[in-house]
Every structure is written in structure tokens, then in C-alpha cells.
Image: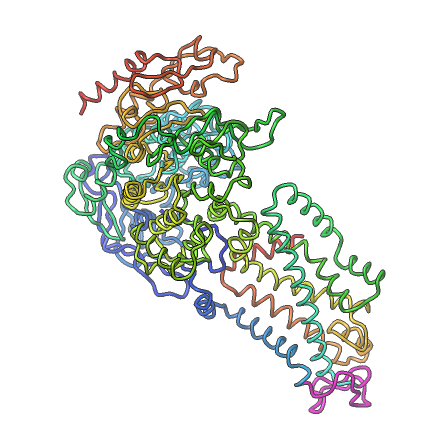
Amino acid sequence: MPAPHSPAPSGGGGSIPPALGKRAARRMPSLSLSGWIGAAMVALALLVAIFGPWIAPHPEGAIVTQDVFAPFSAHLPLGSDYLGRDMLSRIMYGTRLTVLLALAAALFAAVCGTALGLLAAVAGRAVDETMSRVLDAVSSIPTKMFALMIVAAFGSSLTLLVLTAGISYTPGAYRIARSLAVNISALEYVQVAKVRGENAIYICCVEILPNMIHPMLADLGLRFVFVVLLLSSLSFLGLGVQPPYADLGALVRENIAGLGDGAPVVLMPAIAIAILTVGVNLLIDGLPGRGKRLRLRRAAEAR
Amino acid sequence: MNNTPTNLVEVRGLRVVGSSEGRPETTIVHDIDFTVARGEVLALIGESGSGKTTIALSLMGHARTGCRIAGGSIRVGECDVRALLPDALASLRGRKVAYIAQSAAAAFNPARTILDQVIESALIHRTMSKAAAQAKAIELFRALALPEPEQIGKRYPHQVSGGQLQRLLAAMALITDPELVILDEPTTALDVTTQIDVLQAFKRVVKELGTTAVYVSHDLAVVAQMADRIVVLSDGAIREVGSTAQILHAPAHAYTQALIAAVMPTPRGARPEARAAASADERPLLEVKRLVAGYGKVDAKGFPAARVLDDVDLVIHRGKTVGVIGESGSGKTTLAKVIAGLVPVASGALLLDGEPMPTRLNRRTKEQFRRIQIVFQNADTALNPVHTVERILSRPLAFYHGMKGERARQRVAELLDLVRLPAALATRRSGELSGGQKQRINLARALAAEPDLILCDEVTSALDTVVGAAILDLLADLQRKLGVSYLFITHDIGKMRAISDDIVVLYSGHRVEAGDRAALCAPPFHPYADLLISSAPELRTGWLDEASVRCHGELPPIGARAEHSELCTFLGRCPLRVDGLCNTTAPARRQLSNGAEVLCHRTELDLTALQQIPALREGTVV
């Protein structure tokens, strides 16, 4: 007789879910090769994002050479931009901004989505239906159109960008969280807690949430990638981050004129975006329990 | 076929190993030697994890994902299965060796008609033309006693019952005239009343066609009906091989003896003298009065669209066990959930200690919550996988009794001791526990509340026989020590008799019979109770034939049903129905002389007389 497969979407998926510390230790070696490559790419991006201002060779806005669109050299490893600023430093600061903004927006979406999803699972049918339909309506608005509308109406600021991106991706996170929470709340340990007389907050936080945290973290990673792409494309259109700040998308836009000259600098921020997004994707796909994550991914992309 | 002297199957020194990602390989089964003669039915019996399915699959040269056949030889007919190339294996499977799986519902494609799927393997292996295959399939349907053999193939899998689907799966396996059929727990997922039909059909077909079969099961009583020889397995090794009669009557190995002892439950509940001591005027712990409950949309009168429980009464006394029995869909789990407050009540009342108790969860007091605890069937999903045992057990302590810190830790250790588990288990999580341990933790969590009543919903059904028997012992022991009452829900009449003081028989939401344990040991019964009792497999050869005669004869003809909502729900399957009475008027509650109450038109005299006859024959056969 096959061992009954636990439907609990616990992170490990293995037969033995040990303590969290042990779990992490057990996980490390089970990362696939592409997972390790992804992890290295993400680590690089994170290091740059955190320590960028200290390790960048030049300040963000400093014009260091008269030679615009200069090629790679020992002095300017990634060349210079359209004003003669050091591209490496610009990318370091740009990565910092992109990662911070995207992380804030993705966290916003994940936290709101999870909270609403839990509410839908425990609050009963009427609340669930209403909330699901309203969020369906929100998700039916194309994210870029929504962002364009907001920027057109309120102008562009960093806070607004984060909120816009966060709100656009909340319905997606909500759907995942809701389906996880509804499945878990039908499980018997939740029923036992209800019969014990526990209130909804206890049931959500202690019984349901810990069992959905791992898939939600994977979802957070995917959503982070979507937000990076959204913010970069907004900046590329000139609607995102405004000078003197520049995120990676804005860097591509600034230097687009160099394309005609065949200057390599214009490609550098694009490559930085690619490293960040591809790295996160590889890392998530390389995590154990791949089947679950692929399903999640399909669900996220289907919307 | 039988005159060929050689064995059809010969397995020598079989070893299968398995590994999960990144861990060293472990041996799943080792040193397996057995043979199956042509025309013989061999049973592989063992608990979950004993390797019985692994061995059965290896006869087809198959090992499940992560496993591989590491040593030994497997010969089926002329083939050395391990030496076969993938092409040859494909023609072996389905053509020479056929497999009947436990879950027929999962084995059929819901999008295609049954007949297409049944003849598919004949077409793939090109053993016959389509027309011939269809004719043969219909012949098999007839042999398997399926209704409307010419028409049933045109239906889709969801349009037939579970028992029928299981027989159709057998037809699918037999269509190519395989030399060997592997039946892997083919009736485990079925109700006993359905199981008996399926077993009978299998047995007849196997006998008629002279098929060689390997029957994999955990249920010794079922195997006793089907097999010529039995191989007893545990922990991936053969413990004993012998003829069915020898295994049943003179088991040599200690493990087999334990297995047989566990199958025959002995009464455990409160003894009769304790019963006499309980005075009649004592207020019952819990009373359920005229309960109606169900699911779906609620109509104007407040009744749900699907009524799962209809007019159910129940009384539970202190320190006593009430058993609720019925087949799947009879409403037994809903009854427990209603008492627990998880399912809303349409009408009726719950009285706890004579005081009305709110039926809705959010109106109950903490004290009412504490007094009623529930233990679910599926121990895997009843424990939160992220919490340690200690955390799971200390929550009710803190919640109901405000116990914290060192005192709570001590109490957790006491509770673990009470359910006979070592205190060291407290730091583990549910994934690190066995099925029986998990069920004990479930029980300990319920006991932590110090409840008056524990609702036990099929608590032993998901467990192996021996482990389940130990849980029953524990329940009875706890009742003696703590005086707790149980509502014990099961589909197994043997377990029911072993633990219950009073028994309630549910059929499609109606309480068709209620009485004490003795009342359900001898006729008269309600016809449905009779069917249930006589369908429960008994541990002796020949039971199947007797039982089939006793409760699966032709049903008496009956006219059209009158438009009456209160007609007997068992009418369609009742062997004792009366035309002109049962199909026109609602049955009345009838008190029998043995104290039981039945919902039936038949008089006690009728019931006794009609149910005695086969019982007499039973006496002569044994």
C-alpha cells in the first residue's frame, strides 16, 4: 500500500520535517546546479544592492570623463554613459534602487495577498466571494495600463511606484494564498482547533500560516521578478524613477542614444536586469519541491 | 491449464532497493522466494510497508519511482522478467501479466466510455479484432455479474458505482487472457456490502477461467476467501508460507499469530456488571433529539438541499461507548461533526447533561468546548506538521486549564505516558511519527482537555490491523481509568462489537436500528443491519459462499414507489421488502424484545424467522 501522501503543503515535502534550522541545513545540498548558479547571481545582485555606495568607485552623479559613451577601460570598467559618468557606479546605485523598490512592492503584495487570503479562508463564504470578485476586477486591469494611469494622475514618486506595483500584484498573491489557506483550513488539524474553541486569529496565525509560508516565499520571489520588469519598463518609458535617481530601466533609457554609435554601455544595465531576474528564477526553480513551485508559477503566470 | 506441472511464476532471492533524493539506498524487500503454480491463487499479505505491493509490481518487471530491482530472478512462464528489454516488457504487461489496482476510479479515464477502455489493451497487443474484443468484454461483464452487460460499456466511469467500476477494471485486465493476474487490494476502498459482490465476482471468474492470480491484501479475512496459499510478509521479508487452512488454523510464525489475534477483536468495553450499576434515572451525558442536518442551500423551511441526517436520536451515558455504524455516505461522520458544532443543524436539539447546548460553534462556551473533543480518522492530517508534539499537546492545556511552563511540560509527559508513548517523543513533529503514534497523539490531545465525551471518527480505519487493535485496547483502558464516554464511529462491525455498549445503525441518514451490543449479535435485526453483519468478512474459508447466499439473493419484486417523502430509505436494497406496504407507507419505529428499536414494517416474528434460516445453515456447514 503506498504511503498516504500528506496533502499538507508543508515546505519540505519529505517524510521528516525537522526543526527549521535542521531543515535549512538539509536543504542546502539538495539545490540543483542551476539553483546554485541562480543563488550566485542573486547573491551578487544583493551584495551590490546593499554595499553599492561603499564599493562604487565614483559617486552616482559625478562626471568623470569628457569622453561620452567611452568603451571599457581599466579606469572605467563598464565605460561611461551619455554624460561621461562611470557606468559601473551608475549600475551599482541603479541596482540598489531597483532591488529596494521591487522588494518593497513585492513584500507589499505578498503581505496584503496573504492577509486577505487568510481572511477569505476563515471569514465565510460571503466575504470570500466579495473579496475574490473585487480582486478579480483589479487583476483584470493590465498592470502597465494601471501604472500609466496612476502616474498620469498623480505624477511619479518612489512611494507611489511601490504602491502601484504592490497593488497590481496583490490579486495574484491573494489567489495563491487563498487557495493554499482554503485547502489547509479544510484539514483536520484546523477542524480540531475550531472544535477546541480557538478564535479565527489563532487559527490563521498558528495553524494555517506556518504551513503556507514556504510556497508564499517562492511566490514572493516570482512576484519580485515581475515587479522588477514592471518598474524597469516604466522607467524605460520615462514614467518610473525620475532623475537624479536612476534605476536599471532608467539607465537603459538614458543611454539609448548610444545604440546608434554601437556603444556597449547601453547593454550593461539590461544585462544587470537579466542577471537579477534570471537569477531569482533559477534559484526558485532549483529549490526542492519543484513540482509544487512549477504549479505555483503556472498559476501566477496564468493570470 | 492445470495439467502443466511446472510453476507459472518463480521468484528467487528477489531484492528491491529504494532511495530518496540524496540518501543512501535502503532495502525494501529482501530474500523473497516463492512460486505460484498454474491455476493457483497466491495471496501476499502484510501491513503497510511490508513490501507486498513492491513484490507484486516486480512480477511485471516494474519498480516504483526511486526504487529498483537489485537482485534475484523473476520468472513468469517462459520469460525471465529481469532480462527483458523495454519492448518485451511492454508486451508482457497487459498481455501475459495483468494488474488490477486498488483505486478503479483512478485507473479509468473519465473522458472515454468504459468499453473503449476495457478493450484497449486487446487492441494495443493486437490479440483480437475490435468486434471480437467487444463481444468478449460483454461476456466478461456477464461473468462478473454486472447489470445490463450489453449496455454498461457505453457508459462513462462516473456513471457506474465504485463496486461496478472495480469489476470493470477486472474485465479490463482479463480481456487479453493473461496468464497471471495481480490484484492489488482490489476491495480495500469499498464498503463491506459492496466488497462481497466484488469478491464473489472475482472468485467466480478466477475459478471459471482457471486464471493464476496473485492477490495482495492486508485483510486476512478477505484473503481467506480467495487464496489457495498465503505468503505472510512483514518488514520486507517472508515470515511464513503455507496453505490457507494452515495459516488460519495453525499459524507457525509469531507474527502470523499476532495478525490473526488482531483480526478477531475481543470485547473490551465496560463489562455488564458496570452496566447494571448505572441507574436508569441517571441523566445521560449527551442527548441528540430528532436531529436533521445536511449541506447545500437552505430552503424556506430551514432544511438543507442535501439532508445527510434525518430524524436521528442518540443517547450517550457517562463512561459508556455508543457505536455508530453504517456504510460510506450514511451520515456517521456528519453526526460527529454536528455534535462537535462543525456542521449547522436544521432542526433538532443537543442536550449536554440535560441542558440544551448551542448547535453553532460560536455560541458555545469554553466549558462546552472542553467537554466534547473530537479525534479524526486521518492521523496524518489531524496533526499540524509544523508543530512539535509538545506544542500540540500543551495548547489545550493552556487554553482550557491555563497551564504553562513546567507544569504544562509535566502534564504533557503524563499524557504521553497515558497513551503509552515515551516522553522523548515530545520534541518530534508529526512527520517523524508512525501512523499508530500519530493516532495516540491525537487521542492525547483530546484527553488534555479532560473531556467528558470523545468523538472517535473511524480512528482505527487508516491503521494496520495490529496497530488498530492496540488503539482499541487503549481506548477501553482509558475509559476504565478516566470514565470518559465515546461516540465510536466505524464501518467495521467487528470493532464496533468489540468496544461499544450501545450501537446505532445509520443508513442514508436514518437511524434504522438502535440497541445494545447483545442486540446486534443475534437476530432479529433490521434488514440493513443484517446485511452489514453478514457482509463483514469472517476468518474462515467458505464464508464468502455462505454469505453470498444469505444476503445477496434475488430481491423480492416491488411495485412503483408512492409519492411519499418518508418511505423507507433501504427499500431499494431490502431483501425483506413487502410490496404494497414498504413502497406506500412510511415505516414505524418498532421495539424488539431484545431492547433494540428498528425502523421497519416487518414484525419481530417475521424478522427473526427470515433471518434465522441462513443462520441454521451456517451451523450445519461449519
**Was residue A77 drawn as part of the magenta stretch in this picture?**
yes
Q: Is residue B175 visible to us here?
A: no
Q: Is residue B6 left or right of residue B96?
A: left
Residue furthest bottom as drawn: A75
Range of the magenta residues?
A: A56-84
* Rendered view: B230 above or below B21: above
* Residue B582 at x, y percent in the picture: 43, 13
Where residue B410 sits: x, y (%)? 35, 58
What colour-coding does the image apply?
rainbow
Residue B511 is inside the magenta segment: no
x, y (%) of residue A215? 55, 58
Q: Residue B451 placed where, x, y %?
A: 40, 43
Quarter of image, res B271: top left
In this view, the residue in front, B452 or B488, is B452
Question: Residue at image x 70%, y 61%?
Answer: A166
The one nearer the camera, A108 or B550, is A108
Can you say which quadrant of the picture contains the N terminus of chain B?
Answer: top left
Image side of residue B421 versus residue B512, left or right: left
Q: Residue at x 24, y 52 (%)?
A: B237
Q: Is residue B278 left or right of residue B568?
A: left
Magenta stretch: helix, strand or loop mostly: loop
Residue at the spot 56% in from the left edge and 49% down from the top edge: A200
Quadrant of image for the C terminus of chain B: top left
* Residue A246 visible (yes or no): yes
Q: Tell which of B49 and B182 is nearer to you.
A: B49
B448 relative to A77 in the view: left or right: left
